[in-house]
Amino acid sequence: MRETLTRLLHPLNLAGIATWLAVAMVVRPGDMPPWRNDVLLLAWLLAFLGASAICERRKSWRVACFAIEATTTLALVWLADNRSTTPVLLVVLVAQMAMVYPLRVVLPFALAVNVAIYLLLGHESGDNNLALMLSYGGFQLFAALTSHYARSAEEARDRLAQVNADLLATRALLADSARDGERLRVARELHDVAGHKLTALRLNLRALQAASPSPQLQLAEQLSAELLGDIRGVVHALRDAHGLDIDTALRALAAPYPRPTLQLSIDDDVVIEDPALADTVLRTVQEALTNAARHGQAKLLAVHLHRDHDRLRVEIEDDGRAQFPLREGHGLTGMRERIVAMHGRLHVSQATRGGLRIEASLPA
């Protein structure tokens, strides 16, 4: 409910409602019968609000709302006494459509409706009809371009935020990978250099103690044995690292998305040390986030990582609206190719809440 109210209070919607009020004040007086235009105005307003805030997830419903707006505008032009004012509703409709569709769709549609309005006005005497429609056409073109560039700016901002999140997540994985590499190098140095020399020192001390027993030699041999054991413990701890910080990387990836919210669950026994495996998991969740936000209009994306014997299982589910039978686009195809390259398996199905469910199984 709050989300719908926020969309209703968008500046474009407020401007559309104000325009509708102005037209309603001009159209209603003097029309016979008066209820006819009231019904048309109410139908236009309901269709406008439906396309703006209510039918966002239902593309077919939104198309129907746009069709109702265009039809009622034409009917008002035909029936209303003041026909020079009602075409302004078409300016609102064109601006509204340009926020959803590309200009190659909006402009031909606007041209067709303008021609229809000109033909409806043609039965009246007067030479101002063409000038009137050209002026309204200019307003419509301005509104369409304004909405188009506003939508382009929003999409560019979203893409930039996604790229930034991608860089942050990749940087987190690279930093972890560099730390793991440094830990492994230190562990090898301790084992190969310090461990080797301490072992030789202990053998020599033991030989001296056998040849000439001494409490000091015995203590030195005991300390060398303890130091060797401590170094082996440090080497074991360095090698037994907790893997890459996939939790931080995934949360950084989802941070720029206002919707859906990431619900991340990683079992305690999940350890990812291979950077290639971590990158595959990262890209899989990234594509699921993009699909849920762009196509499914989901509010929540649940991600669960757990081990199944020698395999890592990634289960992703959103609460959006997935269209089945599903046609895999470039995103899902790339996800499948990336997982197969890691000798994994991918299964895509419909979630219990109507969204998309993605199950990936990867060797770990």
Image (cartoon, rainbow, N blue to C red):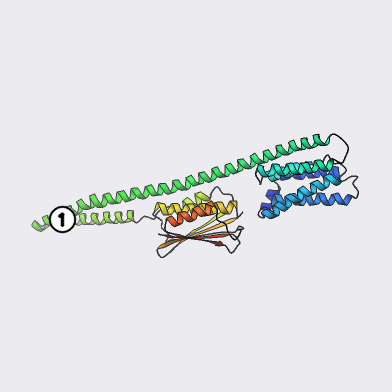
180 shown above or below 323: above
Q: Position of residue 176 (x, y in %)?
A: 40, 49
Query: What's the residue at 80%, 42% (across, down)?
Result: 117
28 left or right, relative to 284? right
155 shown above or below 207: above
Q: Quadrant of the C terminus?
A: bottom left
Q: Amino acid at mark 1?
A: Leu
Query: What's the residue at 36%, 50% (across, down)?
Result: 180
Question: Number of numbered discs present?
Answer: 1
Q: Position of residue 341 (x, y in %)?
A: 43, 55
Residue, disc 1: 203
227 left or right, relative to 206? right
337 shown above or below 105: below
Tell me where residue 121 sits by quadrant: top right
Q: Position of residue 254 (x, y in %)?
A: 53, 50
Residue occupying the far bottom of the picture: 309
Q: Position of residue 57 (x, y in %)?
A: 65, 54
Tell me where residue 241 sits by quadrant: bottom left
Residue occupying the far left of the picture: 211
In the image, 65 versus 249, the foreground residue is 65
Q: Is residue 22 visible?
A: no
**Disc 1 on helix, strand or loop?**
helix
Query: What's the residue at 24%, 54% (across, down)?
Result: 227
Q: Is residue 73 visible?
A: yes
